[in-house]
Image (tube, helix red, strand yellow):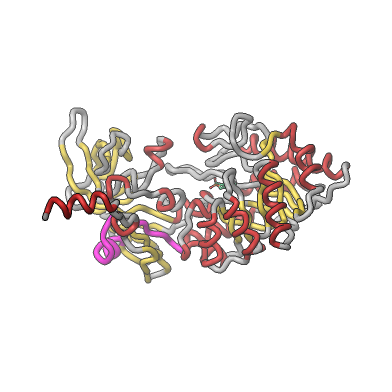
């Protein structure tokens, strides 16, 4: 069974492990993200177990999927490091107790300050996304009197077969360096003082269910490693990225066991430490967005269920037409066809269109399922809405791991002095 049981119906009420979601709503309010520690751990272990045939490996959780310190800390306990894409995520990973050498720093737009921050922290692997970035990292390392350890991210020109907005490995994508340019760039960067280039990296996209494109990309990387070694380069690491998808309905997730077998088969003679950067696969099922029904109002074809969570809290449906299952916290067996929408003043603020859902009434609690990855991490204060609270559950206890924060507190405002003066002048 690929799905675990972090969220279960017990006595007619949906629980996160041993805690009734109604209890959390009462204590913390809504909308609130609720994470199951057990579900996180189970997914982390499934992933690791699937890679059992691979002798030398390191696992790094993609922090952008869920940067909560409590989540990172649980995953650190499961032996995961961190894949980060900003200085802010570096700070989060270190605060969660990740060792700097277990951190991989990806991202196409690292600033000079962020490169220096990474070197100061002693980040284990900086994944370079372009030659100029490599030049800058080397120069910064020399200036600081340290040696940067880095890998070159390759764009293998493989279509991951996923949503266009989460495809990252085709030739028109901004990520990595073109396969055809990789050897030349590697040759030049490897000669740079201050830079130890110890491997190559690839990440072709997210929510990938078909392993074929991943296999194609990995085979290309294998050829590149052989070509680089033939030129005298010492390659000790290959980062295979993340991207394995999950099922957002009731079906099976991306086949992690088949993934492990495929990787073992393709890489058996590479003689490197393989690195993996799963995000969604680890966290998606481990979270729900707990929400309350505000209004049920008539619509032309079916009613609108207006909930207190919006696209600012969970952006994936508006961004990618993503599907999140909507379920009542206390289902009574009846169903209704409805549009499920949020309060934000945008037509794209819609979670379900004419969908058959549990019958709900005003005031009822409900959840949007599988919101543990790319949920809270993508939230904004659009419409001057608060950032949702986040709660972690373990067994029969729960804790607020991030409080609800008003927009005004997140973005303190100040008045230009001329406006202030005019107001004062007016009053005088
Ligand atoms: C986003 C990202 C990941 C994680 O992707 P998932 O689909 O969540 O597994 C891994 N590596 C890099 C470089 C990324 O940008």
Q: Image point 64% across, 52% down: which residue? A: 276
Residue 67 part of the magenta-drawn span: no
For the C terminus, the image quarter is bottom left
Left or right placement of residue 1 versus residue 60 in this view: left
Residue 27 part of the magenta-drawn span: yes
Of residues 393 and 168, the one drawn nearer to the viewer in this rendering = 168
Q: Quadrant of residue 21?
A: bottom left
Considering every residue shown, the one lying at the far bottom of the view is 397
Image coordinates for residue 197, horizontal then vertical, percent = 76, 51
Of residues 45 and 188, the one drawn nearer to the viewer in this rendering = 188
Left or right placement of residue 225 versus residue 424 in this view: right
Image coordinates for residue 297, horizontal then vertical, percent = 16, 39
Considering every residue shown, the one lying at the far left of the view is 428
| Residue 261 visible to an observer of this rendering | no
| Residue 340 visible to an observer of this rendering | yes
Q: How many marks?
A: 0
Image coordinates for residue 109, horizontal then vertical, percent = 57, 45
Q: Image point 50% across, 57% down: which residue? A: 88
Q: Quadrant of residue 208?
A: top right
Q: Which residues are magenta?
A: 21-37
Left or right placement of residue 106 versus residue 63 in this view: right
Of residues 360 and 198, the one drawn nearer to the viewer in this rendering = 198
Of residues 265 and 76, the one drawn nearer to the viewer in this rendering = 76
Left or right placement of residue 386 versus residue 364 in this view: right
Q: Image point 55% across, 35% down: which residue? A: 167
């Amino acid at each position: 069974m690929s799905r675990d049981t972090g969220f279960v119906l017990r006595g007619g009420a949906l629980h996160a492990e041993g805690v009734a979601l109604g209890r959390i709503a009462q204590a913390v309010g809504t909308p609130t993200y609720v994470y199951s520690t057990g579900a996180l751990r189970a997914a982390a272990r499934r992933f690791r177990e699937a890679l059992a045939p691979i002798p030398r490996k390191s696992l790094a959780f993609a922090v952008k999927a869920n940067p909560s310190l409590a989540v990172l800390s649980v995953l650190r306990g499961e032996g995961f490091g961190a894949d980060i894409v900003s200085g802010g995520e570096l700070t989060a990973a270190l605060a969660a107790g990740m060792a700097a050498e277990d951190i991989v720093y990806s991202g196409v737009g690292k600033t000079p300050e962020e490169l220096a921050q990474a070197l100061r922290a002693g980040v284990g692997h900086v994944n370079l996304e372009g030659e100029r970035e490599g030049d800058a990292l080397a120069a910064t390392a020399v200036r600081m009197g340290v040696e940067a350890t880095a890998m070159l991210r390759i764009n293998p020109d493989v279509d991951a077969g996923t949503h266009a907005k989460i495809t990252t490995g085709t030739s028109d994508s901004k990520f990595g360096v073109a396969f055809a340019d990789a050897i030349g760039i590697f040759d030049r960067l490897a000669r740079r003082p201050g830079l130890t280039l110890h491997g190559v990296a690839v990440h072709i996209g997210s929510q990938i269910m078909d392993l074929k494109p991943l296999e194609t990309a990995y085979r290309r990387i294998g050829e590149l490693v052989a070509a680089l070694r033939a030129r005298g380069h010492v390659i000790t690491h290959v980062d295979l990225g993340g991207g394995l998808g999950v099922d957002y309905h009731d079906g099976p997730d991306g086949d992690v066991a088949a993934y492990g077998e495929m990787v073992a088969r393709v890489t058996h003679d590479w003689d490197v430490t393989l690195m993996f950067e799963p995000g969604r696969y680890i966290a998606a099922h481990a979270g729900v967005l707990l929400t309350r029904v505000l209004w049920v109002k008539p619509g032309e074809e079916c009613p609108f269920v207006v909930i207190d969570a919006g696209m600012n809290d969970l952006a994936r449906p508006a961004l990618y037409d993503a599907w999140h299952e909507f379920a009542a916290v206390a289902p009574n067996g009846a169903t209704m066809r409805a549009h499920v929408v949020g309060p934000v003043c945008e037509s794209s603020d819609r979670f379900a269109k004419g969908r058959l859902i549990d019958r709900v009434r005003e005031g009822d609690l409900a959840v949007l399922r599988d919101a543990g990855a790319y949920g809270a991490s993508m939230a904004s204060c659009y419409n001057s809405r608060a950032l949702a609270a986040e709660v972690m559950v373990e067994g029969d206890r729960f804790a607020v791991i991030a409080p609800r924060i008003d927009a005004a507190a997140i973005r303190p405002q100040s008045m230009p002095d001329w406006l202030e003066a005019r107001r004062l002048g007016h009053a005088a």
